[in-house]
Image: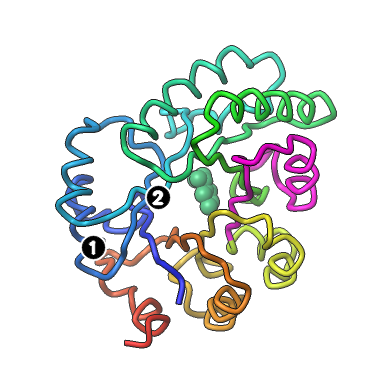
Amino acid sequence: MPKFAANISYLFRELPFLDRFAAAADHGFRGVEALFPYDDAVSQMNRRLERAGLEMVLINAPPPNWAGGERGFAAVPGMTERFRHDFTRARRFAEALGARHLHLMAGKASGLLARTTFVENLRWAAAQTPELSLTIEPINGVDMPGYFLNDFDLAAEILDEVAAPNLGLQFDMYHAQKITGDGHAVWETHGHRAVHIQVASVPDRTAPVAGAVDFPAFFARLDETGYGGWVSAEYNPPPDTRDSLDWMRLAQGA
Ligand SMILES: O=C(O)C(=O)[C@H](O)CO
Ligand SMILES: [Mg+2]
């Protein structure tokens, strides 16, 4: 059975941010991740993590101006200085929180120059923090129009080209299914590159129970293939998140 984490930027939003840590632990999650936890004091978050016995699994590299702002700069030509500045800040947060992974967002861009920029920025970042696991995540172009990294084969090529031991694939089954129509097949091709997984149903990005992906089969496959990382719930819950957690009890055989 996979280790489950809750993305507390999505789940338990009915609670104040700092109270979501305990809520996640109370409902069986062993780790949490957050998109952009830059507004709260690290000491407060660490206290909540410790009290709840949770691991901080992942945070995203800025931008902190998520509402209406940019989706990162790692692949945006001409924005290398901004990328490095953001990365340095994000890295400090990730290290202080003991986060296992830092997701580097590519941003909106296209073309060969964007690809070269992405590779160079990733190479630089990986060399800065050999002890911190960095991830890149293909995101579907309907939810995030213009986002550079919108293809799993492209992500694989870039990972091979950067060839850094601390850079891996963030495999979001929701995006894999939406981009290709067959998330299971994408897992079979690229799963060996995954260091982190996220799940939500397709098409409506709700709890991973029904829809185009067979989640019980996927979780069983992760066990079969010896995936040892986290599986994070990154979906839009109903107003009371507790009403959406049957999928996890089922996966845990409870
Ligand atoms: O959108 C997603 O699926 C993500 O995981 C990113 O972190 C951006 O929200
Ligand atoms: Mg995701």
* Residue 184, above or below 47: below
Mark 1–mark 2 CB contact (< 8 Å): no
Numbered-mark total? 2
Kindly report the distance in space between the C-alpha atoms of the residues bearing marks 1 and 2.
Answer: 13 Å
Give the amino acid at mark 2. Answer: Val
Task: Report crowding for label 2: few under 14, some 14 to 19, many 20 or more residues within 10 A (C-alpha).
Answer: many
Q: Which residue is pictured at 74% across the width and 23% down the height?
A: 117
* Residue 153, above or below 174: above
Q: Which residue is pictured at 46% across the width and 38% down the height?
A: 60
Q: Which residue is pictured at 81% across the width and 23% down the height?
A: 113
The picture places residue 96, in percent across and down from the top left corner, at 32, 32
* Residue 189, above or below 88: below
Where does label 1 land, which residue? 25
Sequence order check, earlier mark of 1 and 2 = 1
Where does label 2 land, which residue? 57
On screen, residue 79 versus residue 185, left or right, reads left
* Residue 58, above or below 113: below
The picture places residue 175, in percent across and down from the top left corner, at 62, 58
Nearer to the camera, 212 or 33: 33
Q: Quadrant of the C terminus?
A: bottom left
Name which quarter of the figure residue 238 lies in.
Answer: bottom left
The picture places residue 14, in percent across and down from the top left corner, at 22, 56
Question: Is label 1 in a helix, a strand or a loop?
Answer: helix
On screen, residue 130 versus residue 123, left or right, reads left
Give the amino acid at mark 1. Answer: Ala
The outermost residue toward the bottom is: 253
Q: Which residues are magenta?
A: 145-172
Q: Which residue is pictured at 67% across the width and 37% down the height?
A: 164
Residue 170 among those drawn in magenta: yes
Ligand 1 within 8 angstroms of badge 1 C-beta: no
Question: Is label 2 in a helix, a strand or a loop?
Answer: strand
The picture places residue 86, in percent across and down from the top left corner, at 48, 21
